[in-house]
Amino acid sequence: MPVSMTGFGRFETNEDTWTHVWEIKSVNGRFLDVKWRMPGHLRSLENGWEKIVRTYASRGRVDISLNLEVLDAGILGVTFNETLAKAMFGEMEKLAHSEGRVFEPDYNKILSMSSLWRDTGNEPDPGLAESLTTGLEAALKDWVDSRAIEGDAMVADLLSRMETLRDLAARVGERVPNILEEKKANLRQRIMDMLESAGAEFSEDRMLQEVAHLTDKLDVSEELTRLDAHLERLGEVLASKAEVGKKLDFLIQETFREINTCGNKGQDTEVSRLVVDFKAELERCREQVQNIE
């Protein structure tokens, strides 16, 4: 069944050496646009993770955030260059001794000296990377479940609206024959009045030509047939398991085109009212479809 592009997923992992929480939020969008918020030293994993995300979604704006807390300092890959620090202290002691002073190291300044620190964590710890990937996939599954629940509700709503649209289209179809008869009678009467006032002869052939032209101008049977086919197809697409958002959007555009033509050809107050009601309901369907993947 179709799923919504709006959803939320979350998964938390707690282990002895780290804890991490993945959160995924999404809204509708024409294309898949993934935005990441995570620690910079994990950026090397982003491409692989994005490939995983794309197996779960094809459209929408997706915001993925990671809250990571490492409990084991060894995992971070940060080391202090003790050898260099001792060499620096030794040289400073020699300098201080030559001037008759005592050298006292300022450890706060030493902490801020980037040259004494080495970050060997260019590549994340393999165990941490595996745990993070597992957590991401679990959060994605939770996210998909929430989208599926909303998708079911949206499909139910759309199917209900389809019934309303079918009813309105049927009422337009019922009204059109009456319009044709009324317009024919009015046309015949107007022609007769004009001929009478002009003292001209009545021509049945000419009358038939005018009636045929009027009938062709007001006939919406083809539009109603296509309209019914579009509504039928919309129901079929909603029942399918594939990604259907773009198909539904296209079908609704075509349905709008047909109902517009019916309204333009109808030239009747009742038909205009039905067409307005149809278009208002179809617009609500369009709003729903904009959020279906």
Image (cartoon, helix red, strand yellow):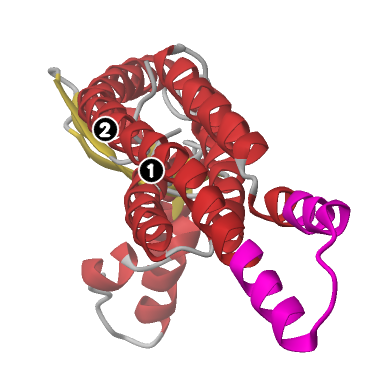
Q: Quick one: quadrant of the N terminus?
A: top left
Amino acid at circle 1: Asn
User: Earlier along the polypeptide chain: callout 2 or callout 1?
Assistant: 2
Q: Quadrant of residue 94?
A: bottom left
User: Which residue is under mark 1?
Assistant: 291
Say what secondary structure mark 1 lies in: loop
Marks 2 and 1 sit apart, C-alpha to C-alpha, by 9 Å
Query: Where residue 3 sits: x, y (%)?
Result: 35, 26
Callout 2 touching callout 1 (CB < 8 Å): yes
Q: Is residue 80 left or right of residue 224?
A: left
For residue 81, say whether it is visible: no
The spot of residue 122 in percent (x, y) is: 53, 37
Q: Please tell me whether residue 46 belongs to the stretch shown in magenta.
A: no
Q: Position of residue 209 (x, y in %)?
A: 84, 53
Q: Is residue 27 above or below residue 20?
A: below
On the image, the x and y values in percent for residue 124 come to: 45, 29
User: Foreground residue, 83 or 99?
Assistant: 83
User: Which residue does the image show at 63% across and 74% down from the upper left?
Assistant: 190
Three-letter residue code for mark 2: Met
> For this rendering, which residue is in front, 22 or 283?
283
Segment tinted magenta in the rendering:
188-213
Q: Residues within 10 Å of mark 1 (few under 14, many from 20)?
A: many
Residue in view at x 56 percent, y 50 percent? 180
Q: Residue 292 sits in which quadrant?
A: top left
Residue 205 appears in the picture as rendered: yes
Res. 154 mark: 2
